Amino acid sequence: MKKLTILFLLISIFSFAQKAELKKEISKITEGKKATVAVSVLGIDFPFQYNNNNAEKKLPMQSVFKYHIALAVLDLVDQGKLSLDQKVFIKKSELLPNTWSPIREKNPEGNFEITLGEALKWMVSESDNNCTDIILRLIDGTKTVQNFLDDKKIKNTQIKFNEEDCHKNLNLQYQNYTTTKSANNTLKVFFDKELISKNSTNFLYKLMVETSTGKNRLVAGIPKGTEVAHRTGTSFTENGITPAINNIGIVTLPNGKKYAISVFVSDSKENFGVNEKIISDISKVVYESLNKPKSGFFFNWK
């Protein structure tokens, strides 16, 4: 008992010092930046949590919401109401122009079939906006997603509008919001298989590992080859203000331990490159902090 007490005391002291140092390093990165930067870090399978002063602000998600949509869809698959193998017919009229849509670039004439599983891959891994709205129509809109979030008690997260809506009125993006703290909590319960089935969790995790967007964000700040399951969000810039440059994800450390990290750069007056570098720089200092030998000592102690 005495040894355990000493160990817990040492862990508490180290954790406090580690968070203080991390706060200092993140403050250096965000200092002087004309943006609201929210940062949250959460150990998935080890005790660590850090939230900066903006971590509980409700900020626009942009395409981060595709992760939440995928959760709701896979919940319906788990219930037997949908199947990953069922066919989804994509009409040419659904392949809207002037929006990010790799599937439209590959199949510009439309009128073809893919499976729901393939549609989810286009939405999550490639961040396809047209596929997102096609999937939302299949599940009866954003209200189905919101009902799932509410049922699973996912707090401070709201999804009201689809991609087409937000492209028509940029102000609507502020009504699709979450906090970085909530995003991390959701990532943890997702990975712990508390939201959807084991098979569905593994399927979505793989899609997130295969994400092709955001190469200059979270993944840019950590060693090449590190496993990162993530989802990005990006808004247009209007009148010199960019409402959202975001990235959430689960990072695997060399010792096999995992942590969730969410960084939102909101209402930024900085240029696109600076906004992305804020995220990559924060990702770098977080990874280095959690990968220190002392951290490994506590994480591997039995």
Image (cartoon, grey):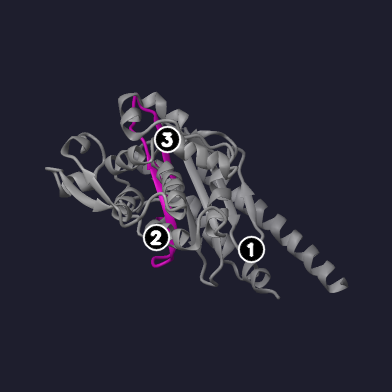
Looking at the rendered structure, the number of numbered marks drawn on it comes to 3
At mark 1, the secondary structure is loop
Measure the C-alpha gap from mark 2 to mark 1: 21 Å
Q: Check whether the beta carbons of the residues at disc 3 and disc 1 lie within 8 A of each other.
A: no
Between 285 and 226, the residue placed more toward the observer is 226
Could you tell me the amino acid type at mark 3?
Thr
Measure the C-alpha gap from mark 3 to mark 1: 34 Å
Q: Earlier in the sequence, mark 3 or mark 1?
A: 1
Front position among marks 3 and 1: 3
Question: In this picture, is 38 found above or below 243?
Answer: below
Span of residues in magenta: 220-246
Q: Residue visible at 67% across and 51% down? A: 20
The residue under label 2 is 209
Examine the image and state in which quarter residue 275 appears: top left
Residue 32 in sight in this render: no
The disc placed on residue 18 is none
Q: Residue visible at 45% across and 29% down? A: 174
Could you tell me the amino acid type at mark 2?
Val
Q: Earlier in the sequence, mark 2 or mark 3?
A: 3
The residue under label 3 is 142
The percent position of residue 202, horizontal first and vertical second, equals: 45, 62
Q: Is 239 colored magenta in this rendering?
A: yes
Could you tell me the amino acid type at mark 1?
Phe
Between 161 and 214, the residue placed more toward the observer is 161
The percent position of residue 288, horizontal first and vertical second, equals: 54, 62
The residue under label 1 is 46
At mark 3, the secondary structure is helix
Between 157 and 34, the residue placed more toward the observer is 157
Estimate how packed mark 2 is, as few (under 14), some (14 to 19) or many (20 or more) residues with alpha carbons within 10 Å: some
Q: Is 242 colored magenta in this rendering?
A: yes
